[in-house]
Amino acid sequence: MLKVLIVEDNEILSNNVAKYLELESIWSKQLFSWEKVTFELVSNDYDLVLLDLGLWDIDGIDVIEKIRSMWKDIPILVLTSRNTISDKKMWFKMWADDYLTKPFDYEELVLRIKALVRRNFTVKSEIINLNNIEIDSENKKVFVSWDEVHLSKLEFELLLYLVHSKTKVISKKQLLEKVWWENDDFSMTRIVDVYVWYLRKKLGKDIIETIRGEWYVIN
């Protein structure tokens, strides 16, 4: 399940956004000021920050700068009433990833959240080397001992998620949520086994280790 940190001082809007995200199976935590943002980002693994630029205790531009100085990879989706070209240039100069102008459509908000999370997941690193395997995440290519191996889109995303989680044991539930964007449905866990088998067949049987039948770790 995706985890979104909502930083918005309008409690009515924040509550409405949180309720809509819940309907879309997106977990969220609401903060109404900058004060606790640092603690939340340190303590929890969020997929995206939904940030209002008009916070009462600090300018949103400063928040972007602070987040980028500590958590450079996390996507930031700006919510704002500001709509001038100069404002937009400033947001992107400070490395905001996208923005929505208030009032906005909630369905569009969810589409943008998912697009940003998927993009961030796919392009964290351009070239990744793993033993005799080279992964070009920008061009979505994989090479084994210099020979290109063709992976499907889901195979590639599963491999990339496991690689970025190297040394971490990953459950089938996590893989369903992060790669397939499905909830923990027992009937769906079989598909994880199948795609792990695909990767072993194409990249080598020892690349992924199974632990107690429910967990995976990249070797």
Image: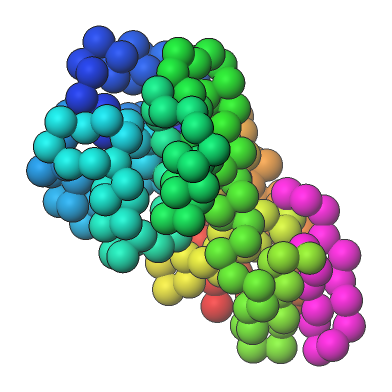
Q: Quadrant of the C terminus?
A: bottom right
> Residue 29 vs residue 134: left or right?
left
Say whether residue 102 is left or right of residue 187.
left
- In this view of the protein, can residue 29 be seen by the observer? no
Q: Tell me where residue 9 sits by quadrant.
A: top left
Q: Position of residue 114 (x, y in %)?
A: 56, 35
Query: Residue shown at 72%/65% (left/top)?
Result: 138
Q: Is residue 100 above or below residue 180?
A: above
Q: Residue at x 45, y 46 (%)?
A: 91
Q: Nearer the viewer, residue 122 or 105?
A: 105
Residue 143 within the magenta-colored segment of the rendering: yes
Percent of width and height locating residue 136: 73, 72
Q: What is the magenta range?
A: 140-154
| Residue sitting at x 21%, y 32% | 55
**Residue 73 versus residue 85 in the image, above or below:** below
User: The N terminus lies in which quarter of the figure?
Assistant: top left
